[in-house]
Amino acid sequence: MSWLNPSPAQAWILLALAGLLEIAWAVGMKFTDGFTRIGPSAFVLVVALLSFWLLALAMKALPVGTAYAVWVGIGAAGAALFGMLLFREPATVARIVCLLMIVGGVAGLRLVADH
């Protein structure tokens, strides 16, 4: 089976990769200085396009709502975590609990997925 026409199992792998790339471009945007720095801006655009492409491939085999929610959840939780680690953003108990709820929701969507 081709990765361009993925099985459901392959689609979940593609979706996980797309989510990791979403973290990369979201965090990378912090370094673009409002897209005024060429190198970081080019990185963000390339990685974002690759993330969107992998998401689109995953959606060939997964329901759109599930795939999109998982992609956003991975990106949101990962970007928030990296914000705390790299940029010293607040790591309050409330923020961490909310991030754990996002992770739980993503895991739950995977567990109840039809594919």
Image (spheres, rainbow, N blue to C red):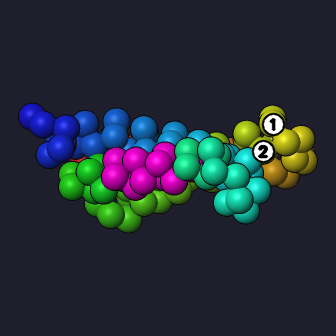
Considering depth in this image, is 48 or 43 the residue closer to the camera? 43
SS of the residue under disc 1: helix
Residue type of the residue flagged with mark 2: Gly
**Residue 97 lies in the magenta stretch:** no
Judge from the rendering whether residue 81 lies leftward or rightward of residue 115; answer left or right.
right
Residue interval drawn in magenta = 44-55
Determine whether 87 is above or below 29 in the image.
above
> Residue at horizontal 34%, vertical 36%?
13
Q: Which residue is mark 2?
A: 83
Mark 2, Cα crowd under 10 Å, few <14 / some 14-19 / many 20+, is some
Mark 1, Cα crowd under 10 Å, few <14 / some 14-19 / many 20+, is few
Location of residue 75 in the rendering, given as x and y in whole percent from the top left corner: 57, 49
Determine whether 1 is above or below 68 in the image.
above
Q: Is residue 102 visible?
A: no
> Residue at horizontal 19%, vertical 38%?
3
SS of the residue under disc 2: helix
Q: Which residue is mark 1?
A: 86
Residue type of the residue flagged with mark 1: Leu
Find residue 34 and name its label: none
- The reply to whether the C-beta atoms of the residues labelled 1 and 2 are less than 8 Å apart is yes
Q: CA distance from mark 1 to mark 2?
A: 5 Å
